[in-house]
Image (cartoon, rainbow, N blue to C red):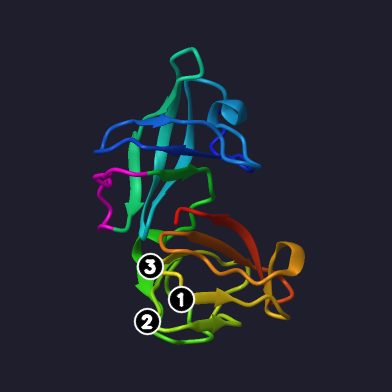
Amino acid sequence: MAKFLAMLVEETTTTTGTGELSLLGATTGHRAFQTAFGASVQCLYTILWGPYWEYGIGTITDHGAGLDTLSRDLCLGSSIGGAKLGLGPGTKYVYCEHVPEGFNSIGCKTFVDGDASPSIKGANVFICSNTGATTITDFDDATEGQMFHIFFGNGNTTLQQGSRLKHPAALDVTPNANDIVTYIQCTNNAFQLIKHSANG
């Protein structure tokens, strides 16, 4: 039986187009797909490329000399209506994550400009491009256990550590343009920052 899920699996890729992904190795604090699953094994994958996402089932192939690929066998959903992303130049993140039912219908939304407690209702990927300096202290309309990703279009936003937002080392976070931040809502209703992919 295929082992579709594993914890702390994330790699990068610079692959373009809609074909299989050439994996470039695990990011800091994570494992490579082959380390977690082995070769010639299917698993769930998620691609995050700026504000765009795709998830599905793929197959890991070991080509030797540390060269691994992940095929995109079955696209289960994406931010472009369920089709595979036509990836452009640049770094993308590929990871293994549980895919909630109905995620394809959730899609991507943009935070209201200047909102200090933007709503995260009805989506799992958000774009944040505040035109002026904005400090976010909370997120509205969360569901327990919700995981969500925020793509930042500029460096105008500060995520403030406090009773609602919990960050490593208890420090504020000011993402740069093109950074991606991931939170999960915990049982105490606070939001724990679990990943900050710095691309700016």
Q: Amino acid at mark 3?
A: Gly
Observer-nearest of 130 and 1: 130
The residue carrying pointer 3 sits among few (fewer than 14), some (14 to 19) or many (20 or more) residues within 10 Å by Cα, namely: many
Q: At x 46% / y 53%, what residue is drawn?
A: 199
Q: At x 42% / y 28%, what residue is drawn?
A: 59
Work out how far the residue at label 3 is from the one at label 2, CA to CA, in angstroms. Answer: 10 Å
Residue 191 x, y percent position in the rendering: 65, 71
Residue 118 x, y percent position in the rendering: 49, 82
| Picture quadrant of residue 61 | top left
Is label 2 in a helix, a strand or a loop? loop
The residue carrying pointer 2 sits among few (fewer than 14), some (14 to 19) or many (20 or more) residues within 10 Å by Cα, namely: few
Left-right relation of 84 to 118:
left
- Mark 2 or mark 1: name the one nearer the start of the chain: 2
Residue under pointer 2: 131
The circle drawn on residue 153 is 3
Q: Amino acid at mark 1?
A: Asn
Work out how far the residue at label 3 is from the one at label 1, CA to CA, in angstroms. Answer: 9 Å
Is there CB contact under 8 Å for labels 2 and 1? yes
The residue carrying pointer 1 sits among few (fewer than 14), some (14 to 19) or many (20 or more) residues within 10 Å by Cα, namely: some
Left-right relation of 57 to 134:
left
- Mark 3 or mark 2: name the one nearer the start of the chain: 2
Q: Is residue 88 part of the magenta span, yes or no? A: yes
Range drawn in magenta? 80-90
Residue under pointer 1: 156
Q: Quadrant of the C terminus?
A: bottom left
Q: Amino acid at mark 2?
A: Thr
Q: Is residue 166 part of the magenta span, yes or no? A: no
Question: Which label sits in the foreground, 3 or 1?
Answer: 1
Q: Reply above or below: 101 against 162.
A: above
